Amino acid sequence: MEKKPELCQVEDALGILVGKWKPIILLYLLQQGTKRFSELKRSLPGITQKMLTKQLRELEDEDIIERVVYPQVPPKVEYSITEYGRTLEPILEAMHEWGKSHTAHKRKKSQQQLTEINKLS
Amino acid sequence: MEKKPELCQVEDALGILVGKWKPIILLYLLQQGTKRFSELKRSLPGITQKMLTKQLRELEDEDIIERVVYPQVPPKVEYSITEYGRTLEPILEAMHEWGKSHTAHKRKKSQQQLTEINKLS
DNA sequence: CCGAATCCCATCCGATACTG
DNA sequence: CAGTATCGGATGGGATTCGG
């Protein structure tokens, strides 16, 4: 029973968000509310069933989303953000905003570099 | 020249932060200011020179940190957070705070599960 | 409809050794 | 001191197939 003297609690949040489809899945569920598996799949062009299942399971394990199975034929499974999962929303929002300005920043940067190249010629 | 209709700008921020040592490198440089390569290496127990170099290069490419080489013998190279890099600080801070409460949340969760198991016996 | 199982490739990351 | 170069294991993620 030892406790790690971790300074870097950043990793916890990062670990949960990392995964090719997790941010989009979370954003989608946050905005759209409860969705079934097939709806998610349709809304995430390019994702395979395997990956969708995997990412959902990992988020479920972390208590970020909830999975409800309706015992019927054909099967029906619904996913939704948990109350706890909503605590991630501000972080996702902040990253989204940062991402938008980052796009602008990159444009500015490449422009600067072009200018410098032109000066040399 | 097409522009992606990306809803998910979250990936940009995420991509920059992902990497086994990036968060801790950033936190360290944010707190400690300018540091040389060897100081960073000493402060990051377990990191190899290869990984340190790689993570630093990637952060530099994204304009998050700055690398200054002093042309002398023995070599001296200093790294510091750029002004632009500091715009990531709120996000890191938010993730750090979330991580702390997440640790508590996980403890509560496992406690609940133990209680349920005891009920069954 | 939802998902498990398998195969396969790309990238990540560590260990180690070498260089100006 | 501050890096490269090379090797090899681990992991992530895609394509495909099978099952309840």
Image: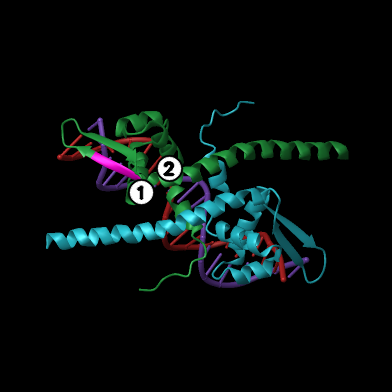
Chain colours: A green, B cyan, C purple, D red
Q: Mark 1 touching mark 2, by CB under 8 A?
A: yes
Residue at left 31%, top 38%? Answer: A79
In this view, which residue lies farthest toward the left?
Answer: B121
Amino acid type, residue under disc 1 in the picture = Glu
Residue at left 66%, top 50%? Answer: B85
Q: Position of residue B83 (x, y in %)?
A: 71, 50
Quick one: B27 or C9, which is closer to the camera? B27
Residue at left 55%, top 71%? Answer: B45
Q: Mark 2 — residue? A: A22
Q: Position of residue B82 (x, y in %)?
A: 70, 52
Q: Magenta region: which residues?
A: A64-68
Q: State the SS at label 1.
A: helix
Q: Position of residue A117 (x, y in %)?
A: 82, 39
Question: Residue A58's mark?
Answer: 1
Q: Per the image, is A78 magenta?
A: no
**Comes first in the chain, label 1 or label 2:** 2
Quarter of the image for residue A102 reads top right
Amino acid type, residue under disc 2 in the picture = Lys
Q: State the SS at label 2.
A: helix
Quarter of the image for residue B44 reads bottom right
Q: Tag 2, which chain? A: A
* Side of A22 relative to B93 (left or right): left
